[in-house]
Amino acid sequence: MDRWHLTIAERGGVPAAGPLVLIADTAHGPRIEAVDRPAAAAGARKGMMLADARALCPEIATAPADPAGDLAFLKQLALWAQRWGPWSALDAPEGLLVDVTAVAHLFGGEEALLADVHAAFAQRGLALRAAIAPTAGAAWALAHYGPERAIVEGRAGIMRALAELPVAALRLDQDVVTVLRRLGLKRIGDIAGIGRDAIQRRFRNRKLRTANPLIRLDQLLGRVSEPLLPVIQEAVPLVQRRLLEPIRHRQLLDRVVADLAGDMARELEAQGQGARRLELGLWRVDGEVVVRRLELAAATRDPAHMLRLFAARLDDVDAGFGIEMLRLRASWAEPLALDQNDIEARAESHGTSLAGCIDRLIVRLGAKAVSRPVPYASHLPERAQRWQPPLEPEPTSQGLLEFHSRPRKLLDKPEKIAVLYATPDGYPQRFRWRGEVHDVARVEGPERIAPEWWRERGAARLRDYYRIEDGQGRRYWIYRQGLIGDGRGGAPDWYLQGLYA
């Protein structure tokens, strides 16, 4: 099995005026993650602290590194690189592996294949090093440390081609490479030339592949298999209609969109998914493409709901000389379990779900006009939620304080009440709220909540919450703000903040 490995050296774009490095913040200061050619010529290296690099070259420019963006770009390249082989795998952060077994003859030989690879990447503004070898380890070593466009035929020629390469070509950790160099083993041929027992005794406790030279050497020579995880393109649900005659009228357009919505619902149901983002593309006869996008509050595969939302987005579509093809694509889908509702009960239900209502409001009023409450990490009940657009993810909540019971209804603002009598231990016996006197029959508490010291002033008082029930069975959530003699004000105040169902 032949594989070729490529290492991406630079991404295309507008070149910097001078040396440029990408940096990442660490506990000891900014560290260099990548360098361009002028910066490398000035002495900057990956892993070097920015202060050390600027001591060598003060005019070095910096930009923040984006590892997540680089990985996403590498995944796109891996899928694109399957034009040269049946499967490809990532070698993060800057490499790709592609299986080219029995493929080279389609390009006129292995040299022509590598030439086609370089030409295709050059068109995309990318510089690279590529090599072909029978194993992934050998291809990696040649791409990083071997000659340009190196080719090795057969496993018997691997050691001859790689014997003069440094031991770093074995993909070992830096501390292992340092140990090997101190032992006088600076080339791959030096390791292969001594007994395995001597190396095994020195590295017998190293179980990781990157820490054991013998494992890496066996992988390089093909004696030990090296599992690779291929990159597989995820097929998103997609349906389309190619029309025999172009359409221009809205009534016909709605009919075709309804057919697409039904096809999409069946496609999503077959995959056990629901759509969260839908993209409708309309191809006009003159070559123009009109795209309308929807983002849904909850996963759905209801064709009527899809059609109703798109109906509000198609009013401003200019059909030109006619629309000849329509394509509906679910670019974001989530698992949605299959359900079997009672048919008669479903026929009698004419209401609208909350998610469907939110979707319709967003389509009519815009995403910024609709907001929803989400939990927020705060001990104080009135601060335990915030409002945000419905399509944004919920923030982290630190457990949401789920171990505390809260009333069904919280007042917008706590209302002050007058406690007419309280026992010495603090339990209220009678209170007046909104002009009505309530006798307390049962009390549970207190639940003490301290003020948020990072937001409140030093004179803020703590709260003792009580769940109480009056003589008529109505339940309330009240709290006493402050303690007698706490030195932060006069007598404590009482407030009612919530009502239980």
Image (tube, grey):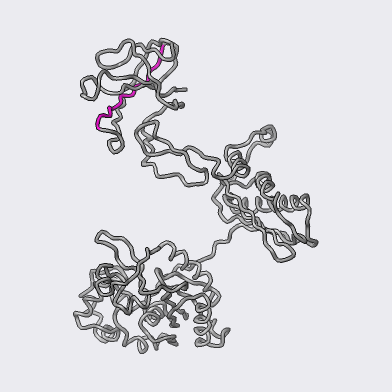
**Residue at the image position 46 percent from the left and 26 percent from the top:** 409
Camera-side residue of 9 and 56: 56
Q: Where is residue 89 in the image (x, y as percent from the top left)?
A: 46, 70
Q: In which quarter of the image is residue 484?
A: top left
Along the horizontal axis of the image, is 215 left or right of 357? left
Q: Is residue 251 above or below residue 496?
A: below
**Residue at the image position 45 percent from the left and 11 percent from the top:** 472
Q: What stretch is highlighted in magenta?
A: 458-470
Q: Is residue 10 above or below residue 109?
A: above
What is the chief secondary structure element of the magenta stretch? Answer: strand
Camera-side residue of 130 and 212: 130
Along the horizontal axis of the image, is 31 left or right of 281? left
**Residue at the image position 23 percent from the left and 69 percent from the top:** 205
Does 23 appear in magenta?
A: no
Q: Where is residue 352 in the image (x, y as percent from the top left)?
A: 63, 36
Along the horizontal axis of the image, is 351 left or right of 90? right
Does 462 appear in magenta?
A: yes
Q: Position of residue 212 (x, y in %)?
A: 28, 73
Q: Position of residue 112 (x, y in %)?
A: 53, 87
Camera-side residue of 218 and 29: 29
**Residue at the image position 71 percent from the left and 52 percent from the top:** 257
Q: In which quarter of the image is residue 29?
A: bottom left
